[in-house]
Image (cartoon, grey):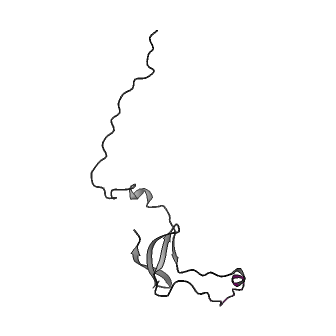
Amino acid sequence: MKSEPFATIASVVFPEPSSAPSDQGSSGPSASIIDDVPVTLEAVLGRAELQVKDLLALRPGSQLGLTTALTSPIEVRLNQKVVAYAEIVAIDANFGLRIKSVVN
């Protein structure tokens, strides 16, 4: 008895990727896909380490020293990863940031 193949196997030829220049750059998805995804940036002024008893003793008017000097750049973080450094500025009646450098 001669066996018959269940399916015919054929080669598949995939088209070569387009080498045409793109407005979105050469890597990653089109920016229009992710343009409306919300993200949260944090500006980290500094840190303070204290004991729980000192934390519980905080009252209105208490002062805490931070690890960052007044003239030091502020860390700008996206998902807890530093993405830039900035300085604090006033924008109308609000705080703002002026980006000084971007982390690659």
Furthest-top residue in this view: 1
The spot of residue 38 in percent (x, y) is: 50, 64
When asked about the image quadrant of residue 60, the answer is bottom right
The spot of residue 97 in percent (x, y) is: 45, 79
When asked about the image quadrant of residue 101, the answer is bottom left
Furthest-left residue in this view: 20
Q: Residue at the spot x=50%, y=83% of the render?
A: 94
Between residue 36 and residue 8, name the one nearer to us. 8
Q: How many dots with numbers?
A: 0
Residue 71 visible in image: yes
Q: Residue at the spot x=33%, y=56% of the render?
A: 26
Magenta-tinted stretch: 54-64
Q: Residue at the spot x=49%, y=71% of the render?
A: 77
Q: Is residue 59 magenta?
A: yes
The spot of residue 4 in percent (x, y) is: 44, 16
Residue 91 visible in image: no
Question: Quick one: quadrant of the C terminus?
Answer: bottom left
Is residue 26 found left or right of 44 in the rendered image? left
Is residue 19 found left or right of 97 in the rendered image? left
The image shows residue 29, relative to residue 104, as above or below, that is: above
